Image: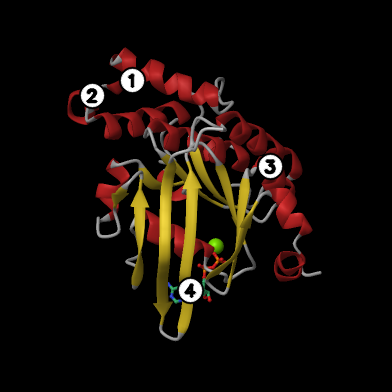
Amino acid sequence: VTEKRTMLEVRGLRKAFGAVKATDGVDLALAEGEIHALIGPNGAGKSTLIAQLCGELRPDAGSIVLDGEDVTRLPAFARARKGLSRSFQITELCPDYTALENVILSLMLTSGRAFQAWSNPRRDSGLVEGARRWLKEVGLGDRGDAHVRDLAHGEKRQLELAVALARSPRLLLLDEPMAGMGGEESARMTALLLGLKRRYTILLVEHDMDAVFALADRLTVLVYGRTIFTGTPDEVRAHPEVRSAYLGE
Ligand code: ADP
Ligand code: MG
């Protein structure tokens, strides 16, 4: 067995909001190509951790190392350029543009072709073809001409995934991608994420435990801002402390 590269290493990350210690010494390591789920009760600090990783929130203490490089002090835009940005933000989609145009926009902003392509992106066939590929990858191959405002909730989230992938991320930070989805939609999203396995390193915050157990190579359990456990899904299932903390048993 070859030792996998560490894609992300988080040590002792802390963030307090007044008296609330949202993250209180989080340790976390992600191996390249793994899907690592982050679970824990409401208020455990999962979203705070994601915001600290992408640079939206400045940590009070601790370090964040991306692929061997300490990025703790870099601002969000500089981390994004290195492939570390939050994925899946509904607010990121332009509602009056089509699905295809949204992916084209993401490609333009990443590739630095914004200025040449801005006047008429559809004439730049490389961008259009690239965008079509990402739409197909997320199962929206036939929805390119639909306006975002006309997409179903699940389709919007699929599009967000395409927008994120178009940015060539090294790490996908997914904060509850299945939130608000029905069974059929979340099964489709689970299948999509399974299809990305090994090609991307993914940190997945998710409450849907069926999805978590179907997807995750390892899980970290966060309670009151602290990492209380990291292990495989089987180890989590077998661990009584984790079961009582998270599953409420
Ligand atoms: P989770 O995503 O695991 O549900 P959060 O990271 O959103 O948890 O929240 C962790 C704790 O920090 C909670 O007690 C929450 O109320 C608090 N918190 C989060 N963001 C803020 C903020 N901007 N200002 C004040 N308190 C916050
Ligand atoms: Mg949250």
* Residue at 26% in and 49% down: 77
Asked if disc 4 and disc 3 are in contact, CB closer than 8 Å, the reply is no
* Residue at 18% in and 24% down: 116
Cα gap from disc 1 to disc 2, whole angstroms = 9 Å
What kind of residue is marked 3?
Answer: Ser
Q: Residues within 10 Å of mark 2 (few under 14, many from 20)?
A: some
The image position of residue 31, as x and y in percent, is 49, 43
Res 237 → quadrant: bottom right
- Identify the secondary structure beneath mark 3: helix
Q: Earlier in the sequence, mark 4 or mark 2?
A: 4
What kind of residue is marked 4?
Answer: Ala
The residue indicated by pointer 3 is 186
* Residue at 36% in and 67% down: 62
Q: Earlier in the sequence, mark 2 or mark 3?
A: 2
Q: Earlier in the sequence, mark 1 or mark 4?
A: 4
Asked if disc 1 and disc 2 are in contact, CB closer than 8 Å, the reply is yes
The residue indicated by pointer 4 is 22
The residue indicated by pointer 1 is 127
The image position of residue 115, as x and y in percent, is 18, 29
Cα gap from disc 2 to disc 3, whole angstroms = 35 Å
What kind of residue is marked 2?
Answer: Ala
Q: Is residue 6 left or right of residue 110?
A: right
Res 176 label: none
Q: Is mark 4 within 8 Å of ligand 1?
A: yes
- Identify the secondary structure beneath mark 2: helix
Pick the quarter of the image with the N terminus. top right
Asked whether residue 186 is in view, the answer is: yes
Nearer the observer: mark 2 or 3; the answer is 3
Res 117 label: 2
Nearer the observer: mark 1 or 4; the answer is 4
Pick the quarter of the image with the C terminus. bottom right
